[in-house]
Image: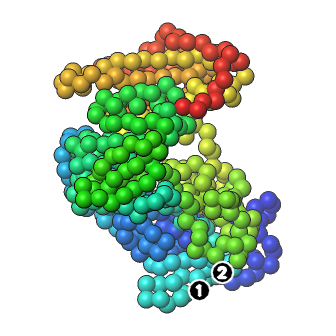
Amino acid sequence: MLNDGELSQPNQEEQTHFDFDLFVIGAGSGGVRAARFSANFGAKVGICELPFHPISSEVIGGVGGTCVIRGCVPKKILVYGASFGGELETDEILRLNGIYKRLLSNAGVKLYEGEGKIVGPNEVEVTQLDGTKLSYSAKHILIATGSRAQRAPIPGQELAITSDEALSLEELPKRAVVLGGGYIAVEFASIWRGMGSTVDLLFRKELPLRGFDDEMRAVVARNLEGRGINLHPRTTIKELIKSEEGVKVITDHGEEIVADVVLFATGRAPNTKRLNLKAVGVEVDQTGAVKVDENSRTNVPSIWAVGDVTNRMNLTPVALMEGMCFAKTVFGGQPCKPDYRDVPCAVFCIPPLSVVGLSEEQAIEQGKGDILVFTSSFNPMRNTISGRQEKTVMKLVVDAETEKVLGASMCGPEAPEIMQGIAVALKCGATKAQFDSTVGIHPSSAEEFVTMRSVTRRVAAASSNPKTNL
């Protein structure tokens, strides 16, 4: 439980009886992790989640949340299928939904199926499927309702789909238009192209994946084009029109493209509209994200929030970290704060991109001294079988003075599997000399990270403007 000090509750609350020590609204990755471990620490925990459906809305969802039901897991299964150019069917989503329910049950967490909202600093209301309303008191309330895909506000937007529907299509589209330049856009473009569809990818910048290392973004763009995806940089959609041939896409340049499916991958919004937060006094930002401090606590001391609903770093493993830190801090007697340094991530395009630490641009912007850049580009051994001419590219960004490795990137087969190990090294503060002294595994792509001896370029601290508009 919370000890006296900065995180302590008002004394009168210690004498108050509550139905639960913790009630969690939202049973996605962060909510389930927080609920399970809080229960393991001895807390009496309740959790509610909307009824299951593969396509989410304000009133339907499912235990497991976005990642398991309509995000990372089904997407990667499709990536596997697209890599082999075939069709696949799976019951994996329902299986994982069941596993999450069992994890909660085994931890002693009481699960309620229905819509939860906060009606007081220590009170939640759950509306069940039959309309019955249940009210419970809780010493702590955790908001973990995640986020939901949004449609671009243009004429004809109802003719488009989001990533939710894209994972539930009954048949493969022959012609697909994807609007967006982020993770979801390039991943679905890769999936559909890998399965044989004609794909047009439209995005606002010169390169996709804004926020990633510019050099690696260019590599991804080259690979997407090399695999037959039609790229339309600095382009957006002005209007969608239903026609006999399909959906007619009108771009802001006046170009017309006819498609069977148009996917909007233009961002997500926090699920907070129906939580009654304003009435309770919980502050949100202009996007609707719940404002929290470094401990994931809102301005109402008994109410906390983790995961995408806070719009901090919207990755499933980060939500798990935030949920774990919450449980340790509030119920485990082990105060800790989420650490967002050197968090690895991956874009599961084909081939995938994976990174950890700083990009070259970020290192220049944040660094006080010169930066050393090491790169390697080669045709991976597996391509000798397929005959595909597609280079794997690897990159290290190093502080010239301390030799500390600040960032690593890789675009090529198995990049995420390799980058997870590199992330451990960066978390431990590894230097370039330590990378160099590590014996490689041969033959492998991964060994390139410990054999890059020659500096590709040295960038002076003040010689370049790191900000980019690409």
SS label for mark 2: strand
**381 above or below 137?**
above
Task: Find residue 401 and report its horizontal and vertical position in percent.
Answer: 67, 15
Q: In percent of the image, x 31 and y 29: which residue is there?
A: 226
- The answer to which image quadrant residue 445 occupies is top left
Quadrant of the rendered structure where residue 418 is? top left
Q: Look at the numbered discs 1 and 2 and tell me whether their residues touch, using CB distance below 8 Å.
A: yes
Q: Looking at the image, is 368 positioned above or below residue 303?
A: above
Left of 387 or right of it: where is 142?
A: right
Give whichever of 269, 358 is nearer the camera. 269
Identify the residue at horizontal 47%, vertical 45% (top origin): 252
* Residue furthest top as drawn: 454
**Residue picked out by circle 1:** 135
Mark pair 1, 2: CA separation: 9 Å
Mark 1: few/some/many CA within 10 Å (<14, 14-19, 20+): some
User: Disc 2 designates what residue?
Assistant: 119
- The count of marks equals 2
Out of 295 and 310, give the one closest to the viewer.
Answer: 310
